[in-house]
Image (tube, coloured by chain):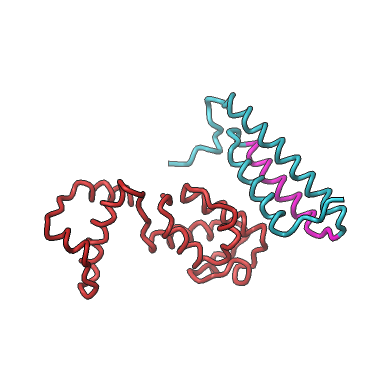
Amino acid sequence: MAEVRGALLKHLRVNTTSLSLLRYPNPTRNGLFTLTVNAIRRSFFDEVMGSFLDKYEVTDRVLCVVKNFQKVDPSKVSPTAHFQKDLGLDSFDTVEAVMALEEEFGFEIPDNEADKISSINYVVEFIASHPQAK
Amino acid sequence: MAAAPTRIDVLQLYRSLMRVARQFCDYNIREYTKRRTIDAFRDNKILTNCSQLSAAFSDGKAQLEVAKRRALVYSLYAPKVKSIMDIKPS
């Protein structure tokens, strides 16, 4: 889905007026417009430094992976769940969950960052702000 | 006698072993490595004796070195046909 969108955006024409919007995006415009502007901005950055994933998409995929994890009760999984307090996982299970997320998004999380991951919120923030996440 | 490994060291060893397990081409060996690390770390979770802890930790580190070498050698002779368990149902 994200690849189709990326390929489509690369072929869109960008006229000169929208370039000025890139520099001064008006925050009071409606959501659809800012989404398009952000999408255009992202297509420029694709070639430069790798694209960032959309936060809702990341949340969906993270929740899907965590729900498929054998030791987790799917009904307790929510975007604000804490691995050890809400989902009842111990530190080994947390490491396993982080590894599964690494595989899902196709990039390596360094050890010092992975140690800080303790809730789904943090994971979504981290992945959404990581340029190499696929 | 070496000092007891800290919690972070143990978790890092666990993570390194799981990462090495990912690199194996053979499905069976990959799953075995994962299973074995999970079982071994859980069994040793209850240890509190300092010398037992450091013995288990250095054992784990030795196994990690072995696994790294094996993963490298196996990758040189990777099978052409993938195991059926690796093929995702389309």
Q: Residue at position x 66%, y 61% from top?
A: A91
Displayed quadrant of residue A128: bottom left
Displayed quadrant of residue B69: top right
Q: Percent x, y for residue A64?
A: 48, 58
Front residue of B46 and B11: B11
**Span colored in magenta:** B28-48
B85 on left or right of A6: right
Q: Percent x, y for residue B44?
A: 80, 54
A16 on left or right of B79: left
Residue A111 vs B21, above or below: the answer is: below
Q: Residue at position x 83%, y 51% from top?
A: B2
Name of the residue lying farthest toward the bottom: A28
Q: Judging from the image, what is the letter of the chain drawn in red? A: A
Residue A94 vs B39, above or below: the answer is: below
Residue B11 vs B72, above or below: the answer is: below
Q: Judging from the image, what is the letter of the chain drawn in cyan? A: B
Front residue of A26 and A8: A26
A34 on left or right of B85: left
The quadrant of the image that shows the C terminus of chain B is: top left
Q: Residue at position x 72%, y 59% from top?
A: B7
* Magenta stretch: dominant secondary structure: helix
B63 on left or right of A75: right
Q: Percent x, y for residue B17?
A: 66, 45
The answer to if B35 sits in the magenta stretch is yes
